[in-house]
Image: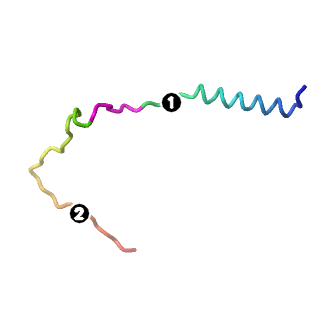
Amino acid sequence: MLDPWIIEEILKKEEELRREQEREYAELPVDRRPMDERPSVTPAPTEEKSERGVMIIDI
């Protein structure tokens, strides 16, 4: 006969294993086609040109 604390440890491990198996995993919609078969994504040209840049503020 096993000691009660050993039985509790076994039950805890079985419960953890069951929770891991029941856990739902989220799947991301990933395009698995090779890069050369994917449609290219380029930004649409805009007529309005604005100045873009980085502002550094020293605190």
Quarter of image, res 2: top right
Residue 30 locus on image (x, y percent): 35, 33
Q: Main secondary structure of the magenta part?
A: loop
Residue 53: numbered disc = 2
Residue 56 locus on image (x, y percent): 31, 69
Q: Amino acid at mark 1?
A: Tyr
- Looking at the rendered structure, the secondary structure element under dot 1 is loop
Q: Amino acid at mark 2?
A: Gly
For the residues bearing labels 2 and 1, Cβ distance under 8 angstroms: no
Residue 19 locus on image (x, y percent): 63, 29
Residue at the spot x=15%, y=58% of the render? 50
* Residue toward you, 47 or 4: 4
- Looking at the rendered structure, the secondary structure element under dot 2 is loop
Residue indicated by mark 1: 25
In this rendering, position of residue 14 left or right of residue 42 = right
Residue at the spot x=27%, y=34% of the render? 34
**Range covered by the magenta-colored residues:** 28-34
In this rendering, position of residue 22 left or right of residue 59 = right
Q: Residues within 10 Å of mark 2 (few under 14, many from 20)?
A: few
Work out whether 59 lies above or below 7. below
* Residue toward you, 24 or 38: 38
